[in-house]
Amino acid sequence: MAVFINHYRILGFSSHESGSKVSKEQIKKAYRSKALELHPDKRLNDPNAVSAFQQLQASYEILKDEQRRKAFNYVLIIREQKLQRENKRRELEEEVTQLRKKLSDLREEKQRKRKKVMADLKEKEEKYRRGLSSVEERRRAKILREEHERIRGMHGNKTDYAFYDYVTRQLSKN
């Protein structure tokens, strides 16, 4: 895979948006000042001086020709759009991860509530078993026992609210 080179940055311009508005004279002026700075004769101890200067020349050749410059600007626009899409995809993946964690937390909370309801129900059943004195209390204890067994058998598809609704209806019937 080829390494992408931003020719505007090599000549010292910030980006293609401001670079594409630069005139030929400004490009020529920027090239001359960079050429003086990067010329291999000025940087004798730098082993990369020749390749840096050649890159500067190639960038200047591309930007001074109108057709090549337009083609390069088009490539830059497409590249920026691709980067924006990738950033959006990363943001969406992060959001999905957060939503999955939230869903997991809600499931755990639901499970804790279900266990608490079961424990409370069992406690009430034991209390009624120990102190049954009236027919009404016996009837309620029987309903609670039946409900306790029903809840043990269910797989978690019903909510706690359905359970409360069921018990309320049973108690109101009798």
Image (cartoon, rainbow, N blue to C red):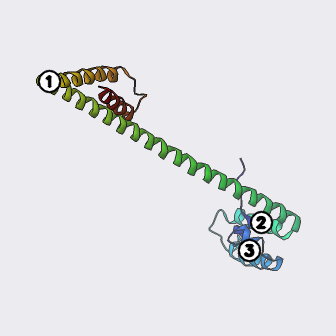
**Which tag, 1 or 2, sits closer to the chain's start?**
2
Q: Which residue is mark 2?
A: 59
Give the residue type at disc 1. Ser
Q: Judge depth for marks 1 and 2 and give the one in front.
A: 1
Q: Is residue 14 above or below residue 115?
A: below
Q: Residues under labels 3 and 2: Cα distance?
A: 11 Å
Q: Which residue is mark 3?
A: 35
Q: Residues under labels 3 and 1: Cα distance?
A: 104 Å
In terms of secondary structure, where does tag 3 sit? helix
Q: x, y percentage for residue 138? A: 19, 21
Q: Nearer the viewer, residue 117 or 1?
A: 117
Q: Nearer the viewer, residue 68 or 28?
A: 68
Left or right position of 23 against 104:
right
* Within-10-Å neighbours for mark 2: few <14, some 14–19, many 20+: many
x 83%, y 67%: residue:
61
Q: Quadrant of the image for the C terminus?
A: top left
Q: Which residue is mark 1?
A: 134
**Which tag, 3 or 2, sits closer to the chain's start?**
3
In terms of secondary structure, where does tag 2 sit? helix
